[in-house]
Image (spheres, grey):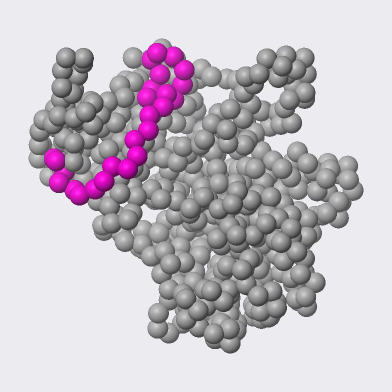
Amino acid sequence: MAKDPGRVLIFDTTLRDGEQSPGASLNLEEKLAIAHQLARLGVDIIEAGFPFASQGDFKAVQRIADQVGGEDGPIICGLARASKSDIKACGEAISPAPRKRIHTFIATSDIHLKHKLRKSRSDVLQIVPEMVSYARSFSEDVEFSCEDAARSDPNFLYQIIQSAISSGASTINIPDTVGYTTPTEFGQLIAGINKNVPNIDEAVLSVHGHNDLGLAVANFLEAVKNGARQMECTVNGIGERAGNAALEELVMALHVRRRYFNTFLGKEMNSPTPLTAIRTEEITKTSRLVSNLTGMVVQPNKAIVGANAFAHESGIHQDGVLKNRLTYEIVDAKTVGLSDNRISLGKLSGRSAVRARLEDLGYDLTREDLNDAFARFKDLADRKREITDRDLEAIVSEQVMQPEARFQLKLVQVSCGTALKPTATVTIEDQEGQEQTTVALGTGPVDAVCKALKSLTNEQNELIEFSVKSVTEGIDALGEVTIRLRRNGQIFSGHSSDTDVVVASAQAYINALNRLVSSDQNFALHPQYDVVNGNL
């Protein structure tokens, strides 16, 4: 991609780093749905995964490269450690895309060199040009990252970066891997690289950062002021530990404060030209899609996409907004795609109308999946008078976008009350069609259901989180349940919705359990924690 000093590229890593959030693993169809929506959003690069991690990740990257990557679409990128096996797998996975990129990395901080890689600086200086050159044999577009750059010796960074560019890297990424730095420090680091790397003009300078101290977005904006022209971020800021820099916050900061940032990008202060290619009206839709499919709930006070982002409780604020929205709102809700159109469909709506609305929401379903979603829609419409977009999103994420089911819920029945011990009767069906039924007691109806399911499936796990919320307002609203199970340090999320929260709880538990079971057959490497052994 040609370097444009007046534009900031958006590199979305929701499907790679975002998926590393505990319990946020996605299956192939879910990844594909998000990738299609990211293309509609207008991101410049989609980092679709880490192909060497597992066969599942390889297939997902390959499918996205084939179906989402187009001549006018986003660049499809895969991650690879600085090893030939990783790079080869990455090159093969992204090969169907007309516009493709290999993103390879190696640690550069002394703490990582000593304790993780057990290599010297001179070792890394030899590895970098060899691996970047090897990546170039698969793709002309190669990005190189200095892992833990924020804690690396700047002078060593300059040497590594110069070598990577000389070997063919056209993008250089500077990650704050552990979310350690502050805005001023990060800005100075970027400025130092621009000043001290002789061939830096031959590459786009990128930034990647985590939010451990709550400074990721501020760090990125300071980096842009000092010459960074690509930002690596995730939808809703999801990612490892405290997450990544949030795409929606970065994009809207550059949009709302364009006059301020224009001068740092060599533009006239009042230039109306957008600083990114993002279609901001797609932001809310993308946020909800990612939240529904990952089970990572967006906090109500989250900037830009939180439920309270455009709500006003204070009487003074309400009065001001009624007189002029600019008194207390710096962003028009419609700019990020938040519409007042609440009621979309009813029980008389047909299959074509449902399909069209789902496509508007970012779901491109197969005929079979559409049939499943439409049947669930009709069932819900018989129980709930008004069907909203949020209801449709819940239907698809719960009914269609689920892992291959080893266990299916056939029946759940509970009895409870002031004079009764909560009791659950549950029936499940396995892949062979065999049904099992059991009864369990609990401290409440949901506890009883979960105990029954655990005894029936005989899969060891620990339930570490149960949360329930209503999808929309009203007494007939869907109850949306998220359950997280932990086994051997791994966390698996289950997500479901129903007008009966006990039924939703049972289905969410089954969904989490199916993810847990499927993970036994798809063990995946972690790109940072699993160190390359043997020959590079």
Write the residue at 80% across / 48% down: 261
Residue 124 sits inside the magenta stretch: no
Quarter of the picture holding the N terminus: bottom right
Q: Indicate left or right for 476 with 66 as reference.
A: left
Write the residue at 41% across / 69% down: 530
Q: Is residue 352 visible?
A: no
Residue 404 appears at what percent x and percent y? 28, 46
Q: Which of the pair 118/504 is nearer the observer? A: 118
Residue 195 appears at what percent x and percent y? 80, 72
Q: In the picture shown, does residue 121 fall above or below 189?
A: below
Q: Which of the pair 367/321 is nearer the observer? A: 321
Quadrant of the rendered structure where residue 129 is?
Answer: bottom right
Residue 460 sits inside the magenta stretch: yes
Q: In the picture shown, does residue 235 fall above or below 386?
A: below
Q: Indicate left or right for 319 with 515 as reference.
A: right
Q: Indicate left or right for 98 with 387 as reference.
A: right
Residue 429 appears at what percent x and percent y? 15, 38
Write the residue at 48% across / 53% down: 241
Q: Which of the pair 235/226 is nearer the observer? A: 226
Write the residue at 42% across / 56% down: 60
Q: Indicate left or right for 388 with 332 as reference.
A: left
Range drawn in magenta = 455-479
Number of numbered discs on residues: 0
Residue 335 appears at what percent x and percent y? 68, 32
Q: Is residue 240 visible?
A: yes
